[in-house]
Amino acid sequence: MVNKSVDAMGSISARMSEAWARGDATAFVADFVADAEFVAFEGTVLKGIDEMVNFHQPLFDTSLKGSRVVNGRVVFARIIGDDWGVVHNRSQVVMPGQDAPVPSRDSMQILVVRWIDERWRVVTFQNSRVITLERQLQLDALESAAKA
């Protein structure tokens, strides 16, 4: 039976987290279409599977080696049209050698997905850091002070 449910959409993020823990960039983007766009947390825009793998694998092999994504939760997943859906996910990262997530790496993702070949595939992915309004105001104050 084909599973075209919102739960099936939401499971993409879990598979990505499992691939991250293994340090496998190819598996990390296995649910993406060949020409998908991926916007990294700091704004880098990647186009296509090759760029995504070439961006992530060196990170998985160095600074992110041994890190893992935890506490992943789907905030919402909705079918928004014929064969189209959207997923909003939240997650945290435990860095190598640490036992708990680092709050500065709390993230949220928006995935636009399309039903292709009997499964949900990611067409566009946006990853962003989650920061509090208080922290943003602190950063704004630091920037203003640096300019003065």
Image (tube, grey):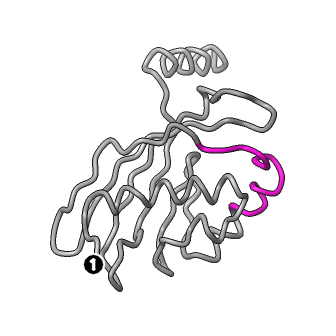
Instruction: Say how many tags the image has.
Output: 1
* Residues packed near mark 1 inside 10 Å, few (<14), some (14 to 19) or many (20 plus): few
Q: Quadrant of the N terminus?
A: bottom left
Q: Is residue 81 left or right of residue 91?
A: left
Of residues 3 and 9, the one nearer the viewer is: 3
Residue at 59%, 26% (x, y): give it. 103
Q: Is residue 146 left or right of residue 59?
A: left
What element does badge 1 sit on?
loop
Any magenta on residue 68?
yes
Q: Is residue 44 left or right of residue 32?
A: right
Looking at this rendering, what residue extends furthest in the front direction?
A: 1
Q: Quadrant of residue 142?
A: top right
Measuring from the top left, give residue 126's x and y in whole percent: 45, 54
Looking at this rendering, what residue extends furthest in the left direction?
A: 81
Q: Quadrant of residue 20?
A: bottom right
Of residues 49 and 26, the one nearer the viewer is: 26
Determine whether 129 is above or below 116 in the image: above
Any magenta on residue 96?
no
Determine whether 76 is above or below 60 in the image: above
Measuring from the top left, give residue 114's x and y in whole percent: 31, 73
Provide the residue designation for mark 1: 1
Residue at 67%, 65% (x, y): give it. 25
Q: Amino acid at mark 1?
A: Met
Residue at 28%, 46% (x, y): give it. 76
Q: Quadrant of the C terminus?
A: top right
Measuring from the top left, give residue 52's x and y in whole percent: 62, 68
Magenta residues, start to end: 56-69
